[in-house]
Image (tube, rainbow, N blue to C red):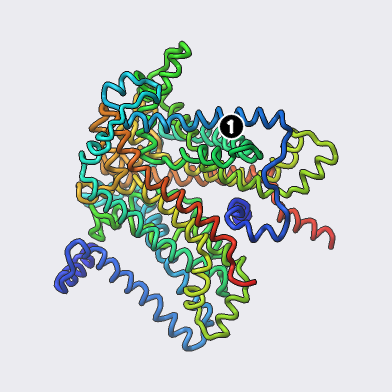
Amino acid sequence: MPDEILETTIASKEPEARRSRRRRGGPTEASPASKAIAFVVLVGGSFLFAYPFLWMIATSLRTRQGVAEGGITIWPVQWEWSNYLDGLSSFPFWQYLGNTLLATLLPVLFTVLASSAVGFAFARIPAPGSGIIFAIVLATMLLPGEVTLVPQFILFRELDMMDSLYPIILPAAFGSPFFIFLFRQFYLRLPQSLADAAMIDGAGWFRTWWSIYLPLSQPIIVAAAVLQFMTSWNNFLAPAIYVNTERWKTFPLALAGFSNANSTDTSLLMATSIVVVLPCILVFFFAQKHIVGGISFTGTK
Amino acid sequence: MNDIVTSIEEALGAVGLPEGLRPIGAFLVILLCVYAVFLVPLWIAVRRRWVARSTAAFWCFISPWVFGFLFFTVGPMVYSLVLSFYSWDLISDPVFVGGDNYVRAAQDPKVYRAIQVTLTYAVVSVPLGVIISLAVALLLNLRVAGINVFRTVWYLPSLVTGVALVVLFLWVFNPNYGLINGVLAVLGIDGPAWFADPNWALPAVVIMSLWTVGGNMVIYLAGLQDVPTELYEAAHLDGASTMRRFWHITLPQMSPVIFFGAITGLIAAMQTFTQGYIVTQSGGGPNDSLLFFVLYLYNNAFKFFQMGYASALAWILLVMILLITVLVFRGSAFWVYYESTNAKARKRARK
């Protein structure tokens, strides 16, 4: 059953596979009057949703006095760009950036590769018990990670990995059930003839996966990489448990400490928050193009 | 285990591996050993034709997941179940205490408080989030000018997550200078102290969660675009009103997506941690109003170093989440509509 739920949810990510089967509904047509009402609601709602964001940016550019006087307005702004410099120089910015990148990019790389390989096996390699194991993979999605919090802590202590980034990177490096599911679904929709042709040409399973299936799954690679990037970049619980010296602090941990220490200096705090959030927004805009662009290509005609 | 790791590390140090890389080196050595134990019998089995080559390839391909599953999921879970019957402060030896940890949890008023806070948050924020994201998705599915700009604006807040989100909303809910109380003051209402007020702290966290409905909205939007158009056309020909079309086509067709959103939302809400930790600086807040279950678990494990008790709490959380999941799955039979299962049933009927 979870298979079908996910199927429906993920369908949007590979529209080309569905389009052939049935015509699906695009944006709904409505009468001009209800459209006008909807437009007003849309504008009002957008304002409501964007306001805290704009206010955050405005606050980050104000002087201390400006923050107190500004209240709920987003204008005037004092354009105190030095807030950003001050905020970032109040902690070892480059070091934290390096730590955060390590703790983000390594899980992205490993989990995408591992999930793709595992998903390929479930989709294309016939083996007894494959269905049952796949059901177990899906079931683990429902398990709360907190149950393993204490034993993992003990495990990493035994492995001599306290106060390092290893406990943050390793659990995320062996593939995630959700991504395995995404890859499997995508590979199932690629024609079986791809694998057959490769095998006839003498490629083994590994070459078939590495040189044919993996490159073809670019949309899923991007989607999985973006999701993992967001999760790892914002991961707070694991660093809060394992990291306790300056050397290995990541941005979320630094920001949390910073908000305790500088809760009075709001503009610095907002400036730092924006810098921490910015990569996620950039990655989103970058990836959006690639996911859409990569979908129309399936390999065979 | 620590002795083995230490000796491997010493060996690696002798080879000249820098100190920071020794733990991961030792880990990789252990990983390779595990792989060897796993691959050698497999290789022999393939040679003697006990198993097909493709079966062996299958197991090699899924081995990363198998390893992660055994080492970071099943192994730790079994360990934590065992540990929940011990009392251990990490320094002295663990002492077997039987079911004492569970008895203690049953008598701990903070556990009840934590369950109450977590369940209240889940039960209020998840349905509200589902309704609002569905409503927003319906709006954003209309064909009006600049719809892509609107979609982006509604989606953007969901990119502000984790600590940055909490830091922003600490400021939004600031009793004196914050956005919310500022707006309320303009309307002539004297706003509450939000995070400092035991009655308003949890509602503030709920409002905070609603600002980021954009993430779910995208999923609902995709679901809406997947509803077959001919259903709407047929209904339109039959003269069905907008409301009826929503009620009898959109909602049933969307029910699997809504169900998925609800169940993942519930599981995530039960695991809320960051909000409580940062707002209350891990204390739990006034009158423990933000003492989420995972926060209490974290405090017991990593502040009070009661590993056994924390493990028992973790298992209580697991059982609670599984119960809720089973309940929601059971209930889903009454309102979730699956096109594919229905098609199968129809085929069976035709035969």
- Could you tell me which quadrant the N terminus of chain B lies in? bottom left
Density class for disc 1 (Cα within 10 Å; few <14, some 14-19, many ≥20) is many
Residue in view at x 68 percent, y 57 percent: A19
> Looking at the picture, does residue B211 appear above or below residue A106?
above
Q: Residue B334 at what x, y percent from top left?
A: 69, 42
Q: Nearer the viewer, residue B314 or B328?
A: B328
> Would residue B112 be seen by someone viewing this image from the given angle?
no
Say left or right for A292 vs B233.
left
> Looking at the picture, does residue A218 appear above or below residue A269?
below
Q: Residue B105 at what x, y percent from top left?
A: 38, 38
Q: Residue B272 at what x, y percent from top left?
A: 42, 39
Q: How many marks?
A: 1
Q: Residue A113 at what x, y percent from top left?
A: 43, 65
Q: Which residue lies furthest to the bottom in this view?
A: B48
> Looking at the picture, does residue A121 appear above or below residue B69?
below
Say left or right for B305 vs B39.
left
Protein chain holding label 1: A
Q: What element carries label 1?
A: helix
Say left or right for B188 vs B234.
left
Asked which quadrant contains residue B284, the reply is: top left
Say left or right for A30 vs B55.
right
Which residue type carries mark 1?
Leu
> Looking at the picture, does residue A172 appear above or below residue B101?
below
- Could you tell me which quadrant the C terminus of chain B lies in? bottom right
Q: Name the residue under label 1.
A: A42
